[in-house]
Image: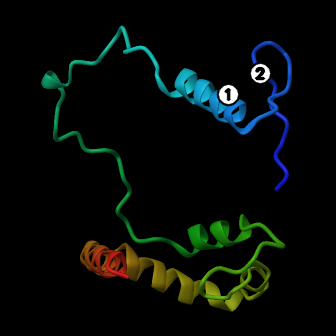
Amino acid sequence: MQSQQIKMTDGKFARTHEELVSKWQEHFQSVLNCLKPTVTHDWSNAQTSTQLPVNMDAISEAEVTTAVKQLKNGKAAGVDNIQSELLKTADSTIPYLTRVCNMMWQPEVAQSIGRMESSFRSRRKGI
């Protein structure tokens, strides 16, 4: 097994496994062991019911068209095996994609998908 050369603090390269481990330990201690922040936020007075301005209107065909045009070419297809180049050339799919997006945007559908996803994750942990 070939390892990469790592410089020690004195400028020499680590020669033994112990020196490599020591250097990595030193590195992670300096990166991960930070001082506590001097300024903190007092969350006790924070408003807990702040509503963010999220547009809950139906998704328009223009929005879907814009999103499809912004897809990058030459990338691997996702789990649906549909390549972005195909979506860009098939304008007739825009109404169908819009309908699917709007179905997924429904709060009750999104919640049920979230429940299915968490159920799937809990089953996968046992594997």
As measured in the structure, the alpha-carbon distance from the residue carrying label 1 to the one carrying label 2 is 7 Å
Pointer 1 and pointer 2: residues touching (CB < 8 Å)?
A: yes
Q: Amino acid at mark 1?
A: Lys
Judging depth in this view, the residue of 35 and 120 nearest the camera is 35
Image position, residue 104 (x, y; %): 39, 78
Instruction: Reply above or below: 90 against 4.
Output: below
Instruction: Reply above or below: 48 against 119.
Output: above
Where does the N terminus fall, quadrant-wise? bottom right
Image position, residue 15 (x, y; %): 82, 32
Residue behind mark 2? 8
Instruction: Reply above or below: 38 against 107.
Output: above
Q: Residues within 10 Å of mark 1 (few under 14, many from 20)?
A: some
Which colouring convention does the figure follow? rainbow
Image position, residue 110 (x, y; %): 32, 74
Q: In terms of image quadrants, where is residue 115?
A: bottom left
In this rendering, position of residue 88 left or right of residue 123 = right
Query: Residue at horizontal 42%, vertical 14%?
Result: 35
Image position, residue 44 (x, y; %): 13, 24
Judging depth in this view, the residue of 119 and 43 nearest the camera is 119
Element class at badge 1: helix
Residue behind mark 1? 23
Query: Residue at horizontal 42%, vertical 78%?
Result: 102
In this rendering, position of residue 118 left or right of residue 98 = left
Q: Amino acid at mark 2?
A: Met
Query: Residue at horizontal 82%, vertical 71%?
Result: 73
Q: Residues within 10 Å of mark 2 (few under 14, many from 20)?
A: some
Marked residue nearer the N-terminal end (1 or 2): 2
